[in-house]
Amino acid sequence: MAQGLSQDELVRWLCDDWLDNGPHVCILEGFGGVGKSRIANEAIRKADFPAIRVVTPEGGLGWEDLLILIATELDEIGETEISCRTDGDLQAGLLSFLRKRCLIVLDNIEAILDPETGLPPRPLQKLISQISQRTPGPGRLLLITNRSLPGGQWMEDVALHTVYPPDEIAGAKILDNLLSMRGLQEEIDAEKRVDVVRWLGRNPRAIEVLVTCLADDPLDDLIQLGSEAWDVRDQIAAPALVKQLEERLARRSLEHLEVNTKLLLQMLSVYRTPFLQDAIDRLSRIVEEPQTAQQMLSKRFFLSRNKRWLALNPIIREIVRNQITKEPRRLRVAHTLAADHFTRHFKSRNSTSSFLAHGASFVESRYHLLKIGKEEEFEEIAANYRGQLLSSYKNVTRMPEDPDAAHQLISVLMAALSGTDRGYPSLRYLLARLLMRRNLRDDDLLAFRQVTYATRSQSQSGAWLLRMELAGKFEGYRAFEAVARQAMESLHENEHWNFYRRLILAAFNTAKPQDALRILNEALQKVTLTQIIPIYTLGAYVLTRLNRSPDAIDLLLNGFIKVNAGGVAYSWRLFEQALFLAHGRSNLDALKKIKQAVENQEDRPGYAFLCTALELQIAGKWRESAIIAESGLEACGEEKYPTLAAQCAFSWICCGNISRASAALAGSFSPPNSATWWTKALMSLCSGAHESYVEYMQKCSGRTLAEPEVYDDILWIKCWDNIPDDLEPYPAFYFPRLPTTLTGLEADLVRLAERPSPLDPALMSQAGLPQPARGRDQPNESQTSTNSEEISRSITNTFIFQDASSPSIVVKGAKNMRDKYEVGQAGAVGPNSKAKDVTIQNFQGSASELDLQRLSSELADLRRAMRSASEHDDEDPERDVSIAAVAQAQAAASQGDQGKALQHLAKAGRWAWDMANSIGASLAAAVLKTQLGL
C-alpha cells in the first residue's frame, strides 16, 4: 500500500477497503497523541460484525495476559467461542475466531515487545503468520504501537502504515473546535492559530492540553514553557520536543486542580487500562463529590470516554502516577481501592460466571493485590480457576525481567499448581527458577518441591540439574549423586556428560577426591566422544589440584589424540591445556611428547610453533620465542592462531617491544577472557595508555576498580597471581612465568594452581610497574638480550627531544648497575650503554631546526598507514581528525614551515604516535611525543 496517507485517507482505506479486501493484518505505528486510537475506533464503528479494541497493559505477563483480555472482551459482546473452549487453549481459540468475519484491535502493543529486539512475542508472530499466510479468512487483526517494529518474515504479508499528525489546516480546525467548545476563542487570535498548531507539532493530544491550560493562563505565558520550540515553529517539530512541551503544559494545568479533583486523579492513575464508572463511584469515601471532580477532569480533557470505558490522558496519568509513587501511603490506598473494584466479581457467592467472563478483572486483581502485598488473597481467588490458569499460561517458558511481572507469575503458578503434584513439568521448572531468583526465605525449599514434582514425569535436563543442586544443599552429596543417577536413567546419553561433570566437581569440592576420580573414570568410559572434551578438561583440573600434574598432562594428551582422530570439534582445547600445564611446570619431556603429537598436522602449523615458543620461554630466551612465534603466525597465513599471537605479544612485552607486541595481536581474534584482557592491559600499561589499562583491568577482574586500585603499581601482578576456583581461563595459566626483565625483581615469578602464591609481603614491597612501563623514554627491544646478565642499551636512528624547562631525568640501574645518573641530554646512559646515529636537541619552539625533508617523508608514510588502518574502523571520527592533522603537518613540512608542522602535530593525538612507532617512523614519533606531551 502507498505510504504517507493522511488520517482521513487512512480511515477511508481501513473502512472501505481493508476491512473487506485488504491484508489480514495491519499495523499502525506513530508517535503518541497523533490519533492512532481514534482511527482504530472509526474502523470499529464502521464494522457491522464483531469488533473489539483491547489495550495492552504494561508491567504484566505479556501475551498470555493479552489473550485473557481478548477472550473477556469478546465474551462481553456475546462472542463466547474462545471462552467456552473445553481445552482452554486461548491461542487456538483466537486463531479459529479470526477465520470468521471479525475485527480485533490490539492497542499499545509496545508494552509486550521484547526490550532487546523490539519484536512482538513469538506466539503473536506465529498468529500473524498463520492468519496472513497459511489459513486465510475474513477476520482482521489491527495492531497499534508508538514504536517502529523491526521487519522479518512474520511481516511479509502485513500492511504497515505510519500515522502522521494532521496537516496544518486540519490541526487548526481541531484547535478552533476545542476553543469553541470551551468558550476560549478570544485566547488565540485567528491569524496566530496556525503558528500554535505548528508549535505543537500538529499533535491533537498536545492541542487538547494547550486548550486546557488556556482556561488558567494566557497564551504568551504558556509559550514561555516551550520558547525554544516556538522559535523554530516553521520547521518540522521533533516528536521528542513535542512530547516535552506537552508534559510541561500538562504539569502547568495540573497546578490549577482543586484538591478533590487532584485526589480523584491520583486514585485513578494506578489503573493500567480503561476502567468502568464503578471505579469512580466507589471513591465517595475518599473523594468528596467524585462525580463533580470527574466532570472537571473531563472538561480539561484529562479523562475521556469511549462507549462505557473511561481512560486517562496517558501523559497526565504518567505524571500523576510518578507523583503518587512518592507518597507510599496514598499509593497503597489507590491500589487497595482498585483491587476492590476488580475483585468484586470473585467475592460474590452467587456468581456462576466462567473465569474468562471476568478474565480482565482477574488480571488486574492480581496486579493490584500483589502491589499491596495481598498474595494470599489473590491465590485464594486463583485457586478456583486452576484448570483455566494452567491452560492459559502453559506455554510460558521465559522468566520476566521485570521484578513486578516475575512476582505476578510466581503467584499465578503457585496458585495454579498447588492442587496437584503431577504433570506440568515445564511450568514447575519455571516456577522453581523464579523462586530461586527471588530468593526469599524458604524459596529454595519451595523450588526443591517443584523440581521434584517436575522430574516425576518427562522433564528437561535443566529441571534435573536444579533438583541435583538443591538435593545436595539440603541432603548432602549422596543425595546429589542419587539424583544424578536417576537423571541419567531418564535422559538421552547426549545429556549425560553434564551430570558427570557436576558429580565430579561436587565430589572434589566436598573433599571426596576418591569419589571424584571414581566418577571421572566412569565418565571417560561412558560419555559419548562428541561430548567428552569437558570431561577430560575437568579431569585435568582435579588431577592438577591433587598435585598430579604429570597424570593430568597424560590424560589431556591421550584425550587430544583420541578426539582429534575422531574429528571432534574443539580438540585444540585439550592440546592447549596439556601444553600450558607442561609449560608452567617446566616439564620439557612432556612438551616434547606434545610437540611430537602435533608436528605432522599440516592444517595446524601454529601448534608446533607454539610448542617451540614455550620451550624458549622456559629457557629464558624471550626474544627468540617472540621471533619463532612471529614465524609461526606467518605460516598460519591470514587466519592467525590466537594463542600463538598472544604468546608472541607477551614475549615481545617481556623484551620491552610494545609496538611488535601490538602488531602480533593485530588481525587476530582474541577470545574474550581474563587472560586476553590482562595481556592487553599489560600492553596499555607499558605504552602509557593508562585509561585503556584501567578499562582492560576492569574487564579482567569483572568489576569496577576502586580509585586506590587504579593507581596501584602492582595491580597487574596481583591480577596475574589470582587463580579462580572455577574452570574459566586465567592469566597465569597461559602466562605462568613472569621474567625478571618484566618485573624488575631478582628472580622469575612462577604461578601454579597447585602451589601457594609466590608473592609474599617482602616480594610485593619490591615489585612495581612493569619494566617497559618504567622506561618508556628509553629504547625497547634492544634493552633485553637472551642472556639476562648482559644488558646493553642502544638507540638506533632516533631523535630525542626534551623541553629545556623540564626537570632532569633520574635513571636507576638494573640489578648489576646501581649507579644513579642525572641526565639533561643523553643518547644512552648506564654502564656499557651505547648510542648509535643519535641527534639530541633541546626543543625550544622554532629555535631547533628539524630535518623537515625527512619529517615530511615519514609523515607521508604515516598518513598512508593511518588511512589503511582506519579502513577497518571507519566509524571513529577522532581518527579522521588525526589523519587530517598529519596531512596538514606533512604539507607544512614539505613547504619548510616547521612552526606550522609542529602546531598540526600537536593536534594529531595519541593514535598518530602509536602508528608512527609501529611503522618505524622514528623522527615523526619523536616529534609527536614531544608535541603531545607524552
Image: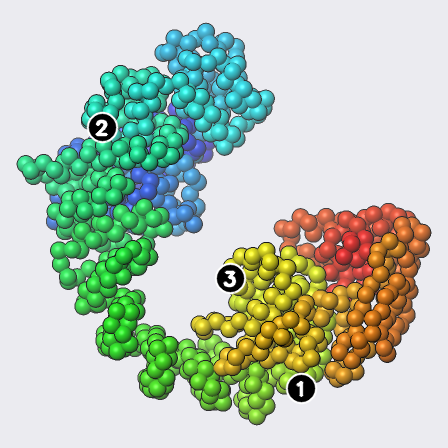
Q: Is residue 555 above or below residue 479?
A: below
Q: Which residue is mark 3?
A: 702
Separation (CA) of disc 1 from disc 2: 83 Å
Residue at 57% across / 89% down in the picture? 587
Q: Is residue 178 above or below residue 744?
A: above
Separation (CA) of disc 3 from disc 1: 34 Å
Q: Is residue 326 at all visible to an observer of this figure?
A: yes
Q: How many marks?
A: 3
Q: Is residue 247 above or below residue 194?
A: below
Identify residue type, mark 1: Ala
Counting residues from the N terminus, which is met first, the one under dot 1 or under dot 2? 2
Q: Which residue is mark 1?
A: 619
Q: Is residue 53 at all visible to an observer of this figure?
A: no
The quadrant of the image that shows the C terminus is bottom right
Q: Secondary structure at mark 2?
A: helix
Residue at 69% across / 52% down in the picture? 879
Q: What percent of the width, then of the height, locates residue 406? A: 30, 50
Residue at 66% across / 63% down in the picture? 684
